[in-house]
Image (cartoon, rainbow, N blue to C red):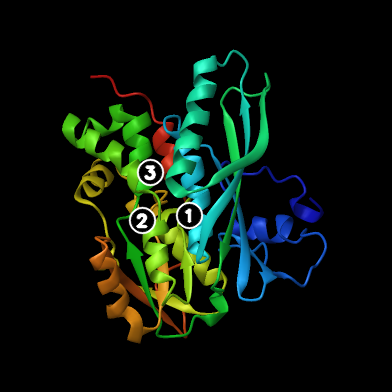
Amino acid sequence: MKGNDAGLTLPSGKLPPDILQKKVLVFSGTVRKEVLIGPRVGEDAAVIDWEPGKYMIVASDPIVGAAKKAGRLLVTVNANDIASKGGDPLYLITTTIFPSETRLERLEQIMEEIHEACLELGVALVGGHTEVNDRYNYPVIVATMIGAGEVLLKAENIAPGDVMIATKHVGLEGMSILANDRPDLLKVVLSTEEIREVTTWINRISVLPEARVLRKWAKFMHDPTEGGLIGGISEVLRLTSLGFELEEENLPVHPLTRRCADSLNFDPGHLISSGVLLAVLAPKNLQEALGALGEQGIEAQEIGRFTKVNGNVRQDATEVLWELLERPKVHE
């Protein structure tokens, strides 16, 4: 870094948007005319003009917070980024780095999870890199997903009065991670049967079904991961010159998530929310889109509207999962 912030110590977690914008995204290599959407805060994937009426969509994400089902999560969150740009995931490249003394069955488990998730989505695992390195004490797994689409969803198309809908319920991924990796925390609030139910939420993290329905009407879609639903909205706002009036009473919070949030004192709106899809629609298309989702058994609801002036959502991508995972173990 240069200037007064050269000695700044970076915070843990996803880089704050201002640092990401000023210190990372300004370095984007050669400018190529076929890159229609490149690196920007709030964009889930790059979009490249490939042939008339068809686009290549490319995304990359790691899994850093989950121990169990990490391979499945890796495939799903990368596929979600492709889906949020209106495309279908096709090809996956992985980088997996394991700490020394990793048991062979752990390596095989993660790779089998990746393989099975790819099969479910019709994705080919076409290459990557795998190694063991004593500089790490936890597996580092990263993937790049390549997909294809026939629509171009741009935030510049969002206008005042457009509505945003959210599918499923906030904190979906975060709650499933807590149930799988920190059930001791949730036992203070939930029964064993309820925790078992939350562990299954990981199977609902794909947004491909709703994205395939909504790309017919959507002006823009976004996959709110770290920072949760509120962080996801604020990321979309950074791509526009608009405000957003959030109808907080309409936030889809599952009763089990609400009970945990109240007891453990965290904001569910800032709990990592892969599995939720935010979609921006013209008001005239709202009811038709909600009806089409309902026919597929996908719950969704309007959560607010874009405004010409500042709304009630501030720029805040705070993520609560990491603090929850670091809390002391709760003994019975």
Going 34% across and 40% down the picture, which residue do you hit? 176
Amino acid type for the residue under numbered disc 2: Gly
Is there a contact, CB below 8 Å, between mark 2 and mark 3? no
Between residues 256 and 152, which one lies in front from this camera angle?
Answer: 152
Instruction: Locate the C terminus and report the quarter of the image it occupies.
Output: top left
Q: Earlier in the sequence, mark 1 or mark 3?
A: 1
| 207 shown above or below 260 | below
Q: In the rendering, at what x and y percent does residue 35 appear? A: 71, 68
Residue behind mark 2: 269
Going 59% across and 13% down the picture, which residue do you hit? 101
Residue 315 showing in the rendered view: no
Residue 80: numbered disc: 1
Is there a contact, CB below 8 Å, between mark 1 and mark 3? no
Between residues 245 and 223, which one lies in front from this camera angle?
Answer: 223
For the residues labelled 2 and 3, the Cα–Cα distance comes to 11 Å
Q: In the rendering, at what x and y percent does residue 158 appear? A: 49, 80
For the residues labelled 2 and 1, the Cα–Cα distance comes to 19 Å
